[in-house]
Amino acid sequence: MAVNPLLVSLFTERAVQQNQVTDITLTDSVITIHLQPSVAACYVRSDCQAPVLVSPHESQAYTVQGLGIQGRALRYVVTSPRVSYVNDAGKFVTFVVPLPGVRADLCVTDEVVEKALYFNVDRNLSLPVTAAMLNELYQVQTSDSAGDDLRFGHYAPAIAGARYAFGFGLDRF
């Protein structure tokens, strides 16, 4: 299905602008955008001296949340291709092609992470209030494990450092 470029230009998230949009579905409460990355013919890999030619191996689809607009939740169905190559040692290697603007480990877009950090660090809101704000304003659903990712995961040092730099205490973290 051909997607209208004018419709795609309405979405400003990095995930839409830097990946290929294959389909857009609208319902009363959800906008679903189907994305896939642009796969290059060859990649520079650390285990090879020269760029290697890759071939498709397999792919998987998963759902990612974006910042909702006009009372509708924004969801991306992302097709994440895995490609393969043979390295200089003769070993068969596969890797997932990265998708710009998508945090696959958190199943959200970069804009959702930035907005969560804005509410939590810049506005000094607690994580439960941040989760409620994301849900109310942007229809982003969070879970306790998502809060734990922010609190104890790889974002914790960055948040703690930002809170210290801006003079916020960690009592509301």
Image (spheres, rainbow, N blue to C red):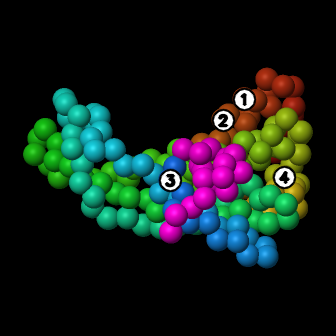
Determine whether, in the image, residue 40 is placed left or right of residue 12.
left
User: Alpha-carbon neighbours of circle 4 within 10 Å: few (<14), some, or many (≥20)?
Assistant: many
Q: Which mark is residue 63?
A: none
Q: Where residue 166 appears, x then y in whole percent?
A: 84, 25
Is there CB contact under 8 Å for labels 1 and 2? yes
Whether residue 152 is visible to the viewer of this picture, yes or no, is no
Residues at marks 1 and 4, CA–CA distance in whole angstroms = 19 Å
Determine whether, in the image, residue 12 is placed left or right of residue 120.
left
Residues at marks 2 and 4, CA–CA distance in whole angstroms = 18 Å
Write the residue at 20% across / 49% down. 85
Amino acid type at image mark 4: Thr
Residue 11 within the segment the image draws in magenta? yes
Residue 162 within the segment the image draws in magenta? no
Q: Quadrant of residue 69?
A: bottom right
Residue named by callout 1: 161
Amino acid type at image mark 3: Gln
Mark 1 or mark 4: name the one nearer the start of the chain: 4
Q: Where residue 165 appears, x then y in whole percent?
A: 79, 23
Residues at marks 2 and 3, CA–CA distance in whole angstroms = 33 Å
Mark 3 or mark 4: name the one nearer the start of the chain: 3
Q: Which of the two marks, 2 or 4, is nearer to us in this view?
A: 4
Write the residue at 76% across / 65% down. 73
In-front residue for pair 168/86: 86
Residue named by callout 4: 130
